[in-house]
Image (tube, helix red, strand yellow):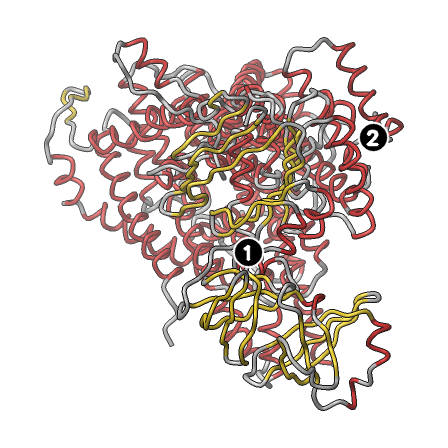
Amino acid sequence: MADALVEFDSVVKKFGDFTAVERMNFTIDEGEFVAIMGPSGCGKTTTLRMLAGLEQPSKGEVRMQGRVMNAVPAHERDTPLVWQSLALFPFLNARENVEFGLQMRGVDAATRRKKALDWLDRLEIGEFAERDISSLSGGQKQRVALARSLVTEPKILLLDEPLSALDANLVIRMQSMLTRLQRELGITFVYVTHSQSEAFAMADRVVIMSRGRIAQIGTPKDIYRAPDNRFVAEFVGRNNIISGKIKSSSGKSVLINGSLGDFKVSLGGRAKPSPGSEGSFVIAADLVRLSSKKPRAGNQIECSLISEEFIGSVVTLFLEARDGSEFKVQIQERELADMDLKHMGKVFVSWDPERAHYIGAD
Amino acid sequence: MKPDRLLKWFLYGYLGLVFVFIFSPILFSIIFSFNSDRFPTIPLGGFTLKWYETIWQDPDVWEAARTSLLVSFSVATIATFLGFTTAYTDYRYRFKLKPLYLALILLPPTIPLIIMALAMLAWFAKIGLSGQVFSIIIAHTVLTAPFAMAIIRLRLSQMDESLEAAAWNLGANQWRALRRVIIPFCRPAIISSFCLTAAVSFDEFAIAWFISGLNKTIPVVILEIVTGNIDPQVNAIGSFVFLTSMTLVIIAQVVLMTKNKTEKEKHG
Amino acid sequence: MPVSGKRTQSALVETTPKRLLSHLLTFKNAVRLPIIIWQALFFIAPLMFMVAMSFFIVRNYRMTEAFEMKNWLKMMGRDYFWDSYGLTIGLATLATLVVMTVAFPAAYTLAFKVSENTRRWAVFLLIIPFFTSYLVRIFSWYVILAESGVINAMLGYIGLGPYIMLNTKFGTIVGYMTLTLPLVIILQTLSLANIDRSLVEAAHNLGCRPWRTVFRIVLPLARTGLIIAAVFCFILSFGDFVSPYYLGGSKPPTLPILIVDTVKSGQQWPRAAVVAVVMMVTLFIVAFGGIAAAYRRRVR
C-alpha cells in the first residue's frame, strides 16, 4: 500500500525461550485508528513497545514510512506513548510535564510554554497548568498525559490501555474525546486494550492477538459477525460454537452433523470443505430465536434453562442442551416477559442457516 | 481478661527498662558534660562549662573537627554517588554474576571494623597512601556506600517502572533521562543518604584510628583521651558529636518522611 | 524490566583501541563499573593483601614480602592465642544468648502489643544510638559502673554494694549489649511484625495457650529473621575491641584486642593478619551456618 505508515514484516520477538510475538505481518495506514486486542500475555503490549522502540524485534523488520526502525533507539523516534500508568513525572507540574518532550527536542522556553498551555487548553485543563500532578483527578491526569504525548505533533500516537484505571462513566467520556481528537488531528492512533467495548467503540480496524499471533484483523463488525476462528469467536463474547463432521455440501452451504443433530450452515464465501472432515460454526447469541413449541423444521436445539443474567434491557439466558453443552441466548427483556419461561420445562432455540457462520476445523 | 492486661503492663514496663538501658549512657554522657566533678557520680556535683571551655581552647580538637568535617563531607559525596550508580544498576539491569556484584557492595558492613582497619592500614602502606586524609575518606566510603545503596534502592523500588521509559519515549537519551527523571525522583533518598553516610563517617573510630596518622578525626581524639585517663572532656566532645550526628539523622528522616507523606496524601 | 538502551552492535569490523573504548564506554558500564573498580581497589584488594600479609616476615623491624608459615606456626603454637580465641568465642556466644533473650520480650511487645505508629517511633529511637559515638557511650558506662559510680552510689542508699562491675565479664557483656541490643531489637521486631497475624490468632482459636503459641507458632515463623539477628549480634560482639578493653579489663585479651596490641606496639602486622584471618574464617563459618539454618526447609 502506498500510504502505509507502519509495516510489520515477519516480526518475531523472543524473551529468552519465550516467544512473545511470532511472525507478525500487518500494516497500519496513515490516519487510521487501530486497536490491538487480546487477553493478557498475548503480545499486544510487546507489539506496541516495538513500535515505540522500547523493544527490538528478534527477527523481521518494523518499518515506518518505509524506513527500517529496528535499530533506531526510542528517543530518536517520534512515537509518543500514553502509558497504562500514565507515567507522569511526579516532581514536575502539569505544564512542565507537557513541556518535557519539547525540551528534549531543544525547543526554546517561550515556545515550549506557549505550546504546552495551548494543548492543556485544548484538552480543557488549562486552569490546572501549574498544579502538581498528584493533586489532579484521574481524568485530568489522563488529559495531561495526552497533551504531553501530542504536543510534539507526532504522526502516530500509541496508547497502552490508557483508560483501564478509570471508572466506567469516565471511560465513555474519554472514549468520545479520543475518537474526536483522532478525527480532528488526522493522525494514526494505535490503541492496545483487553476491553472489547473500548476497541469496538473507537477503532476503524481491530487486530485480535492470541499467544503472539494475529488471530484476525478486520473492522469491528467483521470481527463481531464473522470471526475467522474459534479463538476470535470465543474471545468476542456471546457466541455459541458447535462442532461436528461435514455430512454433505451443496452450493453455498454445508450440512454439519454434531452430537445435537444436523445443522445447515451457509459458507459465506469460504472454500468448500470435503465431506467427512471436521468443521465448526458460530451462531451469535443475539441471532437466535427462542420458542416454547418445537419449530417445524430448520436448525434447532432443545434445551432447558439454567440461569439468566440481566444487563439493562438485554437478558442473557444460559441454557443446557441434551448433551450437557451450554448454549447462550440474548434477547430483549420485554420479549422475555411475553414468555412464561419459569413454567416451561423445555425451550427450543432455532436460527436460519444464513445467520450461522462457518469457521472451519479449528 | 485480667491476666492479659497484667501481661501487657508487664511488657510495657519491660520495654521501658530496655529503653532506659539503651539511652542511659547517652543521657549520662550529656549530663556529665556539665558536671564539675572529674569523676562524676550521684549526687551530682555543680554545674560547669569548663569541659566545653577546655575543648573550645584545644587546637587539637579544632584541627580534628576540621578533618572530621572534611572527611565526612567527602565520604558522603562519594558514597552517595557510588550508592546511586549501584542502586540504579541493580534496579535496571539483569546480568550474569549480579549476586556477586551486589555482594561486592553490601558485604563490607559484615566484616568487623578492626579487620577492615588492619587490611586498610596494610594496603594503604603498600600502595603508598598511608596516613593521608583521603585514605580515611576512601576507607569510610567503602564502609558507608552500602547504606547509601540501600536507601536509594528502596526509593527506586517505589518508582513507576514506566517513568524512565516515558522519558526515552519523549526524546530523552539515557543520560538525560537519568538526570531529568531518575535523579529528581530519587532526590529525597539522595539527601537522606548524604546525611546518613556523613553521620556514620563522623562517628567511626576504629579504621580512622588505624590509618589516620597525624590527621586525626574527632572520634580518634576521643579514643586517645579515653585511653589516657578519666577526663570528662570526652563527654563534652561526645555531646558535640551527638548533636552533629543527630542533626544529620533528623534532616535525613524528615526529608524522607515528608516526601512519603505528601505523596501518600495526594495519592489517597 | 525490559531494556531499551542496548543498541544492536553491528559486527565489529575492526578492533582498534578507540573502537574498543567506545564499546566499553556504554551507558550501562558507566553506571555499573564505578563500584566494581572502587570495591576491587579498596575492599577486595586490602582483604586479599591482608591474607597474603599473614605469610610475610618481619626482619629488623621491617616487613618483607615472602611466603612463609612462620607467623602461622608461631601464633598457632601459643597457648595465649588459643586462650584468647576461646574467650572471644565464649564472650560473643554469651552476649548473643543474653542479647537475644533480653531483646525478645521487647521486640514481641513492639511487634504485637503497640500501634503501628508507636512501633515506627520506637524503631526510629532505636536507630539513634547508631549515630552516637560508641566510644562515648562506653566511657559513660565506665563512669556509671565504677566502684564509686552511679549504680553503686544508688545501691549504697539501700545498703547494698559496692559491687565490682568494671574489668569483669559482666562489664564486657554490658558493652556488647550497648553495641548490639538496639540492632537486635529492630531486626527481631521486623521479623515478628512480618508474621501473618491470622496464624497466631488461629492458634489461639484452636486453644493454644499464649506461652505455647510463642514457642510453637511465633518463634518458628520468625526463625529466619531471628537467626539473622543472632548472627549479626555474634559478628558485632566478636569483632569489637572497645568493650572488652575498657569495660572488661582486657585480661586475657580478646582477638580484636590482640590485633590492636600487635599493630600498635610495633611492626608485627603479619601476626595481626594471622589473627584477623582466623577471625574471618570463624565468622564465615558462623554466618554460613546461620544462614543455612535460617533458610533450611522446615523439618518436622
Name the residue: 83% across, 30% down.
A123
**Based on the displayed image, in which of its 4 quarters is residue B231 positioned?**
top right
| Residue that label 2 marks | A123
| Residue that label 1 marks | C162
Q: Is residue A110 above or below residue A329?
A: above
Q: Secondary structure at mark 2?
A: loop
Residue B236 visible in the snapshot: no
Chain of the residue that carries numbered disc 1 in the rendered image: C
Name the residue: 63% across, 63% down.
A354
Q: Residues within 10 Å of mark 1 (few under 14, many from 20)?
A: some
The percent position of residue C41, horizontal first and vertical second, equals 33, 23
Q: Quick check: A158 left or right of C167?
A: right
Say which amino acid is labelled 1: Pro
Question: Which mark lies nearer to you, 2 or 1?
Answer: 2
Pick the front one: C20 or C265: C20
Name the residue: 54% across, 84% down.
A323
Answer yes or no: do the residues labelled 2 and 1 have beta carbons within 8 Å? no
Q: CA distance from mark 2 to mark 1?
A: 82 Å
Chain of the residue that carries numbered disc 2 in the rendered image: A
Pick the front one: B13 or B108: B108
The percent position of residue C161, horizontal first and vertical second, equals 56, 59
Q: Quick check: B241 left or right of C16?
A: right
Q: Are marks 2 and 1 on the same chain?
A: no
